Amino acid sequence: MPEKVLPFTKEQLMQIIEQYPTPFHIYDEAAIRKNARNLVQSFDWAPGFKEYFAVKATPNPYIMKILKEEGFGADCSSLPELILADKAGIRGEDIMFSSNDTPAEEYQVARELGAIINLDDISHIDYLEKHAGIPEVISFRYNPGPLRKGGNAIIGKPEEAKYGLTREQIFQACEIMRNKGVGRFGLHTMVISNELDPTYFIETANMMFDLAVEIYQKLNIRVEFVNLGGGIGIPYLPHEEPVDLHYVSQGIKDAYEKKITPNGLHPLKLAMESGRMITGPYGYLVATVLHKKEIYKNYVGLDACMANLMRPGIYGAYHHITVVGKEDWPHDHIYDVTGSLCENNDKFAIDRKLPEIEIGDILVIHDTGAHGHAMGFNYNGKLRSAELLLKPDGTVEMIRRAETIDDYFATLDFSKL
Ligand SMILES: Cc1ncc(COP(=O)(O)O)c(C=O)c1O
């Protein structure tokens, strides 16, 4: 299998580890910026194109600030994510608030920040009005249900997914909101996750443009923006290719010119809220081999575990592993690469062909920049690792320290025992 490249040499990494003990996630700022620019440039034809970075992918304000500098907004789905956006200087309509099963307080804070609220259900209209008031601009999340094929283990099939309004409800909701004085409307959808087929995103744009046109024709409401959601996949496997954004953009442009312009809806703003493809390939989980174990299979045990990266354990997801300094060695040993949780699915890799591994070797687990550290948890008393930023000048900044035992116990009052 071809090797994936690292943004640092073995010597650089060993210096980093001297200062910051493993395990940690490290993000490559230069690569994140380059990728962000490529996305924006790919859609330079689209009126007011905006990427609202899906904060849930990498909820770190230093990363969000970098992305803000590249022109991104934030897609938030909870109160802490709204606070993170605010801290990173992302405010007003640069925030889209797309949550579901939303508590009143979150709508209130979203309104205070001037975020665009994206409602997940028609019943939330009354709830929003009661608890936070009706804003000037509103967006609805569309769930096409059986009208759209697709979905996968991460997001579910549209008709089985809990999100969004049905097609019929979208029309009703627009009318209700117009009657309540809303003057500006947006549409949103999120029907796929980790998809590498570029045609899928073009189909989504076609679906949303058709909906916007029908709303205009039936209700005389001009939708101001369409948010196509996230879901762009990344090449986790070394032989996979990234989604060709220029191809996606061109396909969406063709759909825009066929559907939006002739129906009098130009200019319609285009938005996305990708997470994975923005930071995913540019983050790495660095861990040290603590133990080797030979029973019915051969295991190498790391100082990282599923609490640091849960995707292999819950989805069986592939994450490439580099044994640092042994990139060119024959990959002629077969290992399960494990963490220390009392869960047998705490494995970063199963039956993986790797070079011969020794205790003390450094392993780099690739593509952990999105839905990696973010999905961490404390089961088994495991502490969440630090996050580091590899800056374009080669220096490293710690952008989140590792949790300590005191953090873990912070919610307990031992004095009452
Ligand atoms: C509503 C919504 N938007 C955006 C995203 C980001 O998806 P991705 O990181 O796959 O681009 C998610 C992911 O869970 C989501 O639920």
Image: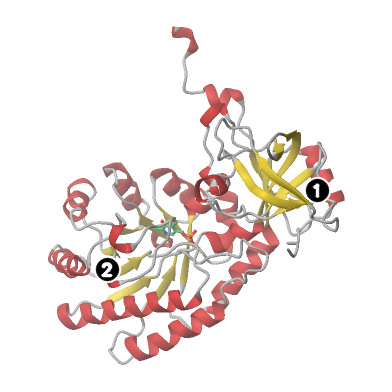
Disc 2 packing (10 Å; few <14; some 14–19; many ≥20): few
- Give the numbered dot on residue 146: 2
- Counting from the top left corner in percent of width and height, residue 74 is at 46, 58
**Amino acid at circle 2:** Pro
**Can you tell me which quadrant of the image ligand 1 is in?**
bottom left
Q: Nearer the viewer, residue 200 or 357?
A: 357
Q: What element carries label 2?
A: helix
Asked if residue 164 lies left or right of residue 319, the reply is left
Disc 1 marks which residue? 13
Q: Nearer the viewer, residue 384 or 53?
A: 384
Query: Which part of the image, by quadrant, shows the N terminus?
Result: bottom right
- Counting from the top left corner in percent of width and height, residue 221 is at 21, 77
Asked if residue 149 lies left or right of residue 75, the reply is left
Q: How far apart are marks 1 and 2 (CA)?
A: 49 Å
- Counting from the top left corner in percent of width and height, residue 149 is at 35, 70
Q: In which quarter of the image is residue 283?
A: bottom right
Q: Is mark 1 within 8 Å of ligand 1?
A: no
